[in-house]
Amino acid sequence: MIESVTVYVDEAAVVHNTKLLRKTLNPNTRIISVIKANGYGLGMVQLALLSEKMNIDILAVLDVAQAIELREGGVTAPILLMGATLVSNFELLIKYDLIQVLIDYDYAQKLSDFGLEHNEVVKTHLKVNTGLNRLGMRDYDEIEATYNLPGIEVQGIYSHFVEAQAYEVDAVEFSKAQISEFKSVLKRLEEQGINPGLTHMQNSPSVLHFGDLGFDAVRCGMVMFGLFHPSQKAYADQEGYKDVVRLESRIAMIRNIRKGEFVGYGRSFYADRDIRLATISAGYCDGVMKQLSLNGGGVYINGTWCPILGDIAMSQFMVDVTHVACEPEDVVMIFGGPQQTIYDYIAITGQSINELVSHLRYNIPRVYENKIFD
Ligand SMILES: *Cc1c(COP(=O)(O)O)cnc(C)c1O
């Protein structure tokens, strides 16, 4: 079935971006593909299966529900959970063969106790807090003690940057302090004869900013999916990274309204002239947020700019097509086409790039184009 709203994903561009990422990295550095939030809006299961075809080493999602969706979708690659799993769901870690992040020492003990009780050794990576203060351990003695807990196996250790996309002197100093704190933890572990396991710290912005810092793996999402912070977009273009995602809808109906009529909830637009008006089948429930209409945004129909009239509603909005040859069911390009890139679009809405893609309604069909693999 063709639906009115569709997210198009350029598979060849994802493959191209991933190859560029690999070229940036040392030959032995492994890639952990981060596909949380429905794969940054691009379709988590589809991206996971594509990642497997690209020989990605590990997939990372937030929670056990996402991991189960991957396993049920046929994904066999190792899966790292980067968020906390509720104690009552620990058994699912075993059932679906998942790698759980250890978020603090108490949590590591609980998981180890669970492993002992069930005669299992639970696979884990240890998170080190180097300043984000979201998840992770900072006390060295607790980190070291975690490696000795009997019911878990610490297969890896990682930390996470706070603002690697920032180039101001104090921000870069902060990033460098994070790197040296993480490295000193690794050094102390090695001095104690402890094998830290797979080490990883770098996300996409840090790879673009610092190159490969020499850890065993990188944990990237954005760069492969053609999503960049404004501070790094020009550099990414120069390196040859490509845009990946496009959102389209369709015209539902067209009508003529007379001067003096209103359009939309709250009479939010007043017609000071006769207007030919098209109703579009998309709204804020799909991820087309009200800010687009409030800030003077529009869409492209048959290559022509059509301003939005009135506020965007939950599943529909209206645009001015007085000047456009068009008919019902014509395609409406909301963002991701050449005339309105995702970056043009967020300049209007004020969203961050990740906010935009992660708000695309979960069950909008994701159609992969320019396919490289069958
Ligand atoms: C989202 C996330 C990543 C990936 O970040 P990108 O900027 O998309 O590369 C890596 N690590 C953690 C802990 C994350 O939450």
Image (spheres, rainbow, N blue to C red):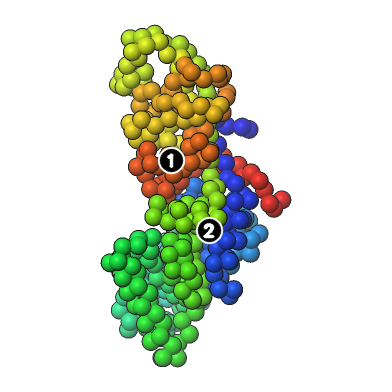
Element type at marker 1? helix
Q: Position of residue 218 (x, y in %)?
A: 50, 68
Which residue lies at the image location 61% right of the left edge and 32% below the top edge? 2
* Upstream in sequence: badge 2 or badge 1: 2
**Whether residue 274 is situated above or below residue 321 in the rendered picture:** above
Which residue lies at the image location 52% right of the left edge and 24% below the top edge? 251
Which residue lies at the image location 68% right of the left edge and 52% below the top edge? 372
Q: Quadrant of residue 4?
A: top right
Q: Is residue 329 left or right of residue 101?
A: right
- Residue behind label 1 places its C-beta within 8 angstroms of ligand 1: no
Question: Which residue reaches farthest front?
Answer: 238
Q: Quadrant of residue 163?
A: bottom left
Say what amino acid the circle numbered 2 marks. Glu
Residue designated by label 1: 344
Question: Which residue reaches farthest right?
Answer: 374
The answer, for residue 11, to whether it is visible in the render is: yes
Say which of 139 and 185 sits in front. Answer: 185
Q: Position of residue 366 (x, y in %)?
A: 57, 42
